[in-house]
Amino acid sequence: MELIQKEEVQKVLERFLNKDVYVHLETTNGAYASHFNSQASNVGAFIRNVQIRYKQVKIIGSTSFRVGLKMDAGWMYAEGLTHWELDEHHRLLLAGHDAEGRLMVACEISETPFK
Amino acid sequence: MEQHQHVVIILPHPDDESFGCSGTTLKFREQGIPVTYLCGTLGEMGRNMGSPPFATRESLPEIRKQELLAACKVLDMDVQMLGYRDKTLEFEDTQQVATHLKSILDELRPSLVITFYPGYAVHPDHDAMGAAAIEAVRMYPAEQRPELWAKAITHDRRDVLGEPDIMYDVEAYFEKKMKAIEAHRSQAEGMLSQFRESPQLKQLNQEAQKHLRYEEFYKWTF
Ligand SMILES: [Zn+2]
């Protein structure tokens, strides 16, 4: 993955406009957060291979980015994104990592289902 | 160490076997006892992607699969991947997973099964895998039932469960154990550094050493 280039990612996000796409959306602070620090709570959510269709999309930010997808009847949103990749299956992978390289958030879009 | 014919380890993640019972595995293998690892998932939801990132959410499973194969090679044990998905094991039907495990145990006929101690294993997948493994072993009539050792890792384990029944000092195998852990390159460094930084484990270097040097288990009574 590479650091997010806003303009390039915006272009790729627009390729999926008005198409039925599969998404993976995830946020996590790890399953061991409270094991290693009793002050912390384990927090996380993910949804995978859910089909959506969005009609408007923006990526906003400077070093860490937010993405918002507007659908007919709702929104999808991710914050804290730092890296991106268009993989060999033409899937757009966006992720936010902390300083140690641990994933904190992921937002992925694909025209075919994720494995 | 008692004489066993075949040992089966049932844990959910690539690296659980190396952190948790690789010294024990090496000890069994040295005695020529076959050991098979049934690995529940591919750790698909692991968080360590590297800095700069060398893995993505989508490429991680294959990377971890290769790491698992490499670690099992170091430990000289067989491995079967069960195909569940990381973080979802606790939402599977326990009886169904137990039946799946039992069908594999029927083939392998182990004399000893090692798994996590449900409720004392920190990660929900650990608890769920342990619970299913215990159910699978419970299905055997008492006279055919393999022995079962459960691994507890919560900080309060000793206060609640008492002293473990089995405690191996695996110092003699430490170098190989670290090699197995390091085979899980994508996750090991993150895990080891969390150990080092944890306020819970301040004297960590000592504590981690102890945690890695002594492998302890509770004997399950059915
Ligand atoms: Zn684990």
Image (cartoon, rainbow, N blue to C red):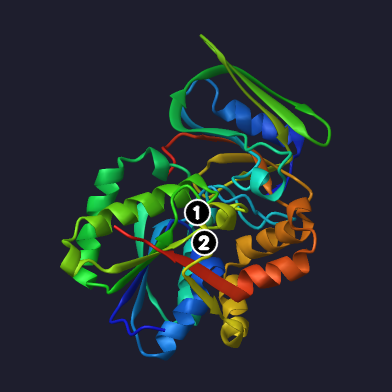
**Residue A84 against residue B147 in the figure, above or below:** above
Q: Is residue B177 left or right of residue A11?
A: left
Q: Amino acid at mark 2?
A: Arg
Residue occupied by mark 2 = B64
User: Could you tell me if the residues under marks 2 and 1 are in contact, i.e. CB atoms within 8 Å?
Assistant: yes
Outermost residue, right direction? Answer: A62
Q: From the Cβ of disc 1, is ligand 1 less than 8 Å away?
A: yes
**Residue B155 against residue A107 in the figure, above or below:** below
Secondary element at tag 2:
helix
Residue B205, percent from left and from top: 77, 69
B105, A18: nearer the viewer: B105
How many callouts does the rendering have? 2
- Packing grade of label 2 (10 A; few <14, some 14-19, many >=20) is many
- Packing grade of label 1 (10 A; few <14, some 14-19, many >=20) is many
- Look at 55% across and 12% down and name the residue there: A74
Q: Amino acid at mark 1?
A: Gly
Outermost residue, bottom direction? Answer: B31
- Whether residue B84 can be seen here: no
Residue B156, percent from left and from top: 60, 52
Residue occupied by mark 1 = B43
Marks 2/1: CA–CA distance: 7 Å
Residue B184, percent from left and from top: 57, 67
Chain of the residue that carries numbered disc 2 in the rendered image = B
Nearest to the eye among marks 2 and 1: give it: 1
- Look at 62% across and 44% down and name the residue there: A30
